[in-house]
Amino acid sequence: MANRDVERGGKRNRGANNNNYFYDESSGETHWTSWLIPAIVVANLAVFVAVMFVNDCPKKITGANKECVAKFLRRFSFQPLKENPLFGPSSSTLEKMGALEWRKVVHEHQGWRLLTCMWLHAGIIHLLTNMLSLIFIGIRLEQQFGFIRVGLIYLVSGLGGSILSSLFLQESISVGASGALFGLLGAMLSELLTNWIIYANKAAALITLLFIIAINLALGMLPRVDNFAHIGGFLTGFCLGFVLLVRPQYGWEASRTNTARNKRKYSMYQYVLFVVAAVVLVVGLTVGLVMLFKGENGNKHCKWCHYLSCFPTSKWTC
């Protein structure tokens, strides 16, 4: 199991922090000052500014009926709303800056797009929604587990989301940090499950998390939303939580001073979940990458899976 000593930065007693309403404060654990999540937020904002600078709508837009939105921003103004209703750049600019596109990843050997796409956003609405969610979810996790583990979950979950998206959505480009965000949600769920005995109000915590996850996955079934990135990121983060976010059993610290009642640091079920999750994670990412670079289309292996990303109704088509 991971040792958190290497991740320390501004450590202080958990008893001074009451933000985690369902954690048992009597455990006396410590937490870290969150700096990685704010840094990721700043990086995403900076990238968006850079993308809008490159986009330069007034210079590139053509046609009498096409006008940039918020023209007072000059080269930082947005594409016409008919082209991009999220107040952002053009698709061609996003593609140029590193958006996820199956053909370029597979046939032009641009595998780096699997990672760069998570730093791009389709518009200011998309960006603000993701960054607010990241602050709400990520800061709590970083305070509890440190920047190394949360950073790994964020990046690897983003990669997992990009892999699944590329396997099933091969006719469009994809951008956004949603896969990484869903990875953090998945890690929160598995962390709760593997550390079940040290939590107070277990049912409230579980119901709250499942409700948030279900609502967000349901919203991902709307048109123009890449729900495969959400699902891939969530599953990756869910496995990583069992591996990276394991806590010692309740009472283990106290038992160390009493040799007659020495208690194991981790329970057997935590070890089992650790091994199973690690195997599933490695096999899943490996198989996904192999299928992707062989040019496989996931829809041929799962005829109904396309409904997971967009469910057609009388109000919209996919």
Image (spheres, rainbow, N blue to C red):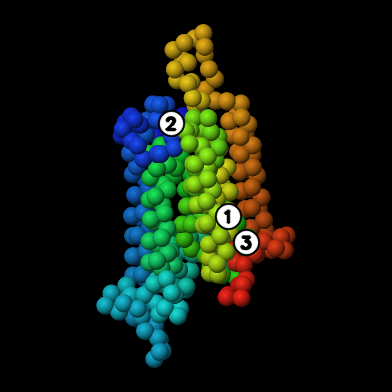
Residue linked to disc 1: 231
Task: Identify the secondary structure beneath mark 1.
Answer: helix
Mark 3 vs 1: CB contact within 8 A: yes
Task: Identify the secondary structure beneath mark 2.
Answer: loop
Residue 289 can be seen in this image = yes
CA gap, disc 3 to disc 1? Answer: 9 Å
Task: Identify the secondary structure beneath mark 3.
Answer: helix
Res. 24 mark: 2
Mark 2 vs 3: CB contact within 8 A: no
Q: Specify the quadrant of the image occupied by residue 292.
A: bottom right
Please state which amino acid type lies under the numbered disc 2: Asp
**Residue drawn where x is 50% and y is 52% of the image:** 212
In the rendered view, tell whether residue 224 sits above or below residue 7: below
CA gap, disc 1 to disc 2? Answer: 30 Å
Please state which amino acid type lies under the numbered disc 1: Ile
In the rendered view, tell whether residue 34 sits above or below residue 30: below
Residue 172 is situated, as x and y percent measured from the top left of the image, at 56, 70
Please state which amino acid type lies under the numbered disc 3: Leu
Q: Earlier in the sequence, mark 3 or mark 1?
A: 1
**Residue drawn where x is 60% and y is 67% of the image:** 310
Q: Earlier in the sequence, mark 1 or mark 2?
A: 2
In front: label 2 or label 3: 2
Residue linked to disc 3: 308
Q: Earlier in the sequence, mark 2 or mark 3?
A: 2
Residue 261 is situated, as x and y percent measured from the top left of the image, at 52, 11
Residue 147 can be seen in this image = no
Res. 15 mark: none
**Residue drawn where x is 37% and y is 84% of the image:** 67
Q: Quadrant of the C terminus?
A: bottom right
Residue 121 is situated, as x and y percent measured from the top left of the image, at 43, 64
Q: How many marks?
A: 3
